[in-house]
Amino acid sequence: MKRKKRTPKRKTNAPKPRYRVRNWAQYDRALVQRAALTLWIADDLPNHWHPPATPKRGAPQRYSDYAIEVMLTLREVYQLTNRAAEGLMRSLFQLAQIDLPVPDHSTLSRRGRKMSVRLPKRSQEKPLHLAIDSSGLKVYGEGEWKVRQHGASKRRTWRKVHLAVDCASGLVMAVAVTDARVHDSTVVEPLLAAVECPLASVAADGAYDRRRVYEALVRHSSGVQIAIPPRRDARIWQHGNCKAPPHPRDENLRFIRRCGRRRWKAWCGYGRRSLAESTVSRLKRLFGSGLRGRLLSVQDVSVRIRCCALNVMTGLGMPESYAVVAG
């Protein structure tokens, strides 16, 4: 059999674009404020340290869910262990002269398995422009250097993190943690269930080119513009002689056949999908690309805590960059 000749890549002499930050002073203050303890610990923390009294039978809990969530946030932000987070909180209470008990590392580990962490919601008057993407976080296994030198072994285990990002603000609106073998299209409906606002557009890569994804998006928001590239050998799902309205995927495919894939990307705003990739990159650079927990419930709580902290950091300030025109 003859091998197909690979088409050589086009060489362009265009220089690489350069960018500058317009609001560097504000962004610099936001970077400094990310590590401030006063950002993650509220002034009224002692008032919410113990849970309110309930009429339920049995011994009440000693620490509230808010206290456990604060300690888990400190653990993820400063990349500590449970014992180190316990020591940090004890020293802070000692310096502030606060006479309150601190949960030990075993209590923090036990309560962290059943925590229900919700992402902070903001009121949205206009429909959202959403970008969906997924990436992997390593549970255990060799590092990248060992894999490049000697190959990967069978004990490398990953978890897949699915994110739904607001393109306007950069906030994580929904998150889900699944096994690495779960397909991306099966998690779209749970992500949309967590997004209560109507959608104006959704951008995702070709892995989401499935019927279930389009059906979930249309059920959530009628008239939403879907920017998902069809496969190269894609065919029309619903022909013109049907009584049903035109399928959004077929409209994208017809536009690509008529004008090309590049013009379709510019027309539907497919470039917004890169904002989800940037959010995944920020999540890994700030909190690491691995997970310390071994149970899926613990890993889910850890990722949700990271996303909540990332939203807080995003709210402090983001860079406003612009391209520098070479003169």
Image (cartoon, grey):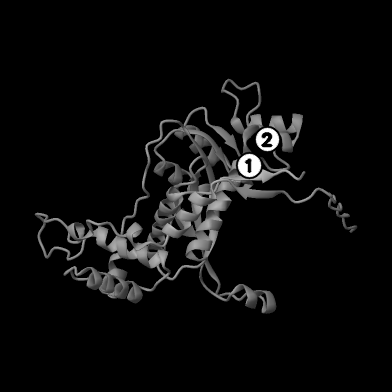
What percent of the width, then of the height, locates residue 66? 26, 58
Name the side, left or right, on which 238 lies relative to 44: right
User: Can you say whether 134 is above or below 88 in the image?
Assistant: above
What percent of the width, then of the height, locates residue 45? 23, 59
What percent of the width, then of the height, locates residue 289? 52, 65
What percent of the width, then of the height, locates residue 311? 43, 51
Viewer-proximal residue among 227 and 86: 86
Name the side, left or right, on which 200 lies relative to 18: left
Q: Which residue is drawn at 41% across and 31% down?
A: 125
Quadrant location, the C terminus: top right
Secondary-structure class at tag 2: helix
The answer to whether any part of residue 145 appears in the image is yes
Kindly check if marks 1 and 2 are in contact, taking CB atoms under 8 A apart as contact: yes
The answer to whether any part of residue 208 appears in the image is no
Return the residue at label 2.
266
Pointer 2 local density, CA inside 10 Å: few below 14, some 14–19, many at least 20: few
Query: Looking at the rendering, which quadrant does residue 248 occupy?
Result: top right
Viewer-proximal residue among 52 and 293: 52
**Which amino acid lies under the numbered mark 2 shown in the image of this protein?**
Ala
**Which amino acid lies under the numbered mark 1 shown in the image of this protein?**
Gly
Secondary-structure class at tag 1: helix
Q: How far apart are marks 1 and 2 (CA)?
A: 7 Å
Query: Looking at the rendering, which quadrant does residue 292 occupy?
Result: bottom left
Residue found at the far right of this picture: 2
Q: Earlier in the sequence, mark 1 or mark 2?
A: 2
Viewer-proximal residue among 306 and 294: 306
User: Can you say whether 58 is above or below 13 in the image?
Assistant: below
Name the side, left or right, on which 234 lies relative to 276: right
Pointer 1 local density, CA inside 10 Å: few below 14, some 14–19, many at least 20: some
Residue 271, which numbered label? 1
